[in-house]
Each structure stands twice: as C-alpha cells, then as structure tokens.
Amino acid sequence: MPENRSDTGSDDFRELAGSARRFSGEHSDVMMNSNGNGGGAGRAASIISSATSFTMGTSSENPFPSYGLEQNGQEPIYFVDGSVGTEAPSLSSSAAYNDTHFHKDATETVHKMYMAMLYLLSNPEEFQKVIAFYEKRGSHSTLSAWNAELEDDKTTDGTNTPPPLPFVVFTDDAEVVLPQAHTASQLFGIERAGGIELEAAAGLLALSQLFLRWLALMPGGDHMNVIDPPGLTVMRIAGGRYRVTCAHRVVWTWMNQFLPEAMPSMGEPGNESKKSELPFEFGDLVTMTIVDVFETDKDGKFLSYCPTFDNRAIKKTTQATERLRKGSSAIKS
C-alpha cells in the first residue's frame, strides 16, 4: 500500500472514506436502481475510490495551497485586511501602524494658536498685512516679476521675511462667520432688538477683510483676556482635527454716539420696548464676553472660527479693574 501523505487534513478524508464504506454496506438495498443493478452502490464505490486515492495517493502535490507560504507545521493565519501570514504581527509592526494611522496629540499647540488668534484680534493691522501681501503679489503679471519681488524681500541673513501672522494661524481655505454690521450703531443698536446679521468668508484674503470690518466696531479692543476657568475645552476628533470652545473678554473704549432712532433699549428682559439711558457714555471703558468656537487641523491651524456674543451684554469697566484682572491672571499662570 502506498505510504500515507502527511498533508494537513488527510485524517478528515480517511474518516470520509470510512463513512462512505459503512453507508454503502448498511444501505446496499436502497442503493439498487430500478433495473436491479447496483448503480447507487457503484456511485458510492466511486466516492470511496476517489477519497482513498486522495488520502493515500503517492503524489507530493499539496491539496491545500499556502499562497506562497511554507507550512512548516504551521497553519496560515488570515487577517482582517485580507493578508495571509504564519504568525501574528509583532509589537514593532503595531507601533508602526499607530504612527501611520494616529496623529500626534497637538492639544498644546492648539492652546498656543488660540493665544496667537487673540493677538490677531487685538492687533487688526496684522490682517491689513495680509491684504497688502495679496495686493503686492497680485500686481505682477509675469513670473519673472514675481521672482524679482521675492528676491527683494530677502533679509540680510539670506532668509525670507516671515509671512503675516494670519498665514500661520489659519489654513489657506479657512472659513469664518462674523457679524455683517458696518457700524457700531447697527451692531450694538438696531440689531440689539432685531438680531445680528451674519456673514461668512472663506480664504485668507476674504476673512481678513471681514475681520477688519468687525474689529473696527471695537476700536483699540484688547482681546487678550482668556476666561479661566473654564479655559479651553479641546475635543480631539478622529482624523487629527480638534474642536474647541473657550471664552475671552474684549475691553475697548466706547467711541460711538447713537442716533435717536438707533438708540438701543436697555430695559429689563421682557420689557425691551422701554427706553432708558445707556450705562456708559462716549469715552468710557467697556467690556463684553465672547465665546469662541473653532476647529483646527492636526497642526493646530484654524479651519473655522465662529465667535458668539450677546450684543445686549456690554458693561462699563475701569482701568483699575482691568489691571487687577490682568494681574490675577498672570499669578494663575
């Protein structure tokens, strides 16, 4: 008798052949066809012969393809991604997967970018630099002229002059949603009762123009006043992005005189129709709380920004109070 093969699974086929033999012996009467011959038994014998030749054959061909992997006594492992191997992935390969599919935590960078954003709000001239940058580059009609201008921007140490700060804080396609108002009388007067009209802008040039228009309604505003606690609430989103909520106070000198028809109602809630005197006058120091909602990319750069504030909640303050608050914030940090 030929030597048995050592291929995995031969025992299963021996059991199959034995079962076929027993079946043909026990049910030989049923397996007879209508002509009285043993057609059914013949088919059973054929099954037995095929199974026996499969398990007892002398061919060295492996009936179980290994997909190019040597068995060496090991069963192939089929992974979720469809690959085939002989052992589980090592810890080093798992670490490489994590480095590829999971981004480094940038929460600290998000905090720094937010402080840079508050600096921009306190220094609107930085947005004006963006407009000047685009106007300067847009005036060239040829590539050689643009390259010549770039060479002129070289500093004495041979490096390029840094771009305006908004290029660092915002992505190129960042979006913002800000008040549409052109005057303080509109934002803090007429829209106090009718609601604030909003306007969206996308791209550095458009958002810079919109920021300039909004910040002009709070001249000389100091936005570097983070309300902490609660500070920043940073939610890490799959894919490396971050969604953040936080709040700051803006302090500026009130430089607006309302026309009679634009005089805001300072009455109590539920009785806004009742007119009363403003709690502050021209030249007073005022403050307002702004809640910031924004998203950043994996590098902490702003993808979107939407400030939320109550234009009915402007309060008078003093320089002594603001100095005290600044001092207490410095002590906490």
Image (cartoon, rainbow, N blue to C red):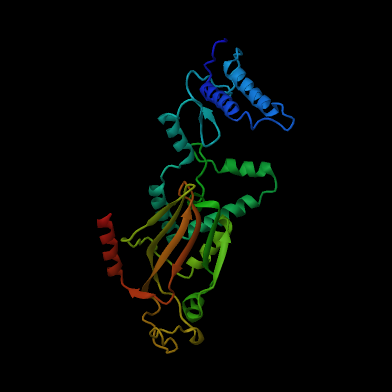
Residue 279 locus on image (x, y percent): 36, 81
Q: Nearer the viewer, residue 195 or 92?
A: 92
Q: Nearer the viewer, residue 189 or 217?
A: 189
Quadrant in which residue 83 is drawn: top right
Looking at the rendering, in which quadrant would you find the N terminus? top right
Q: Residue furthest right?
A: 35
Task: Tell whether 141 sits left or right of 325.
Answer: right
Q: Nearer the viewer, residue 135 or 117?
A: 117
Looking at the rendering, in which quadrant would you find the C terminus? bottom left
> Number of numbered discs present?
0
Compared to residue 76, the image places residue 333 above or below, namely below
Residue 277 locus on image (x, y percent): 39, 86
Q: Residue at x 46, y 65 (%)?
A: 307
Compared to residue 148, the image places residue 28 above or below, namely above
Q: Residue at x 46, y 41 (%)?
A: 102
Compared to residue 32, the image places residue 256 above or below, namely below
Q: Residue at x 43, y 62 (%)?
A: 292
Residue 8 locus on image (x, y percent): 52, 21
Task: Tell whether 121 sits left or right of 28.
Answer: left
Residue 285 locus on image (x, y percent): 36, 73
Task: Tell whether 291 sits left or right of 318.
Answer: right
Q: Residue at x 63, y 20 (%)?
A: 49
Q: Residue furthest bottom?
A: 274
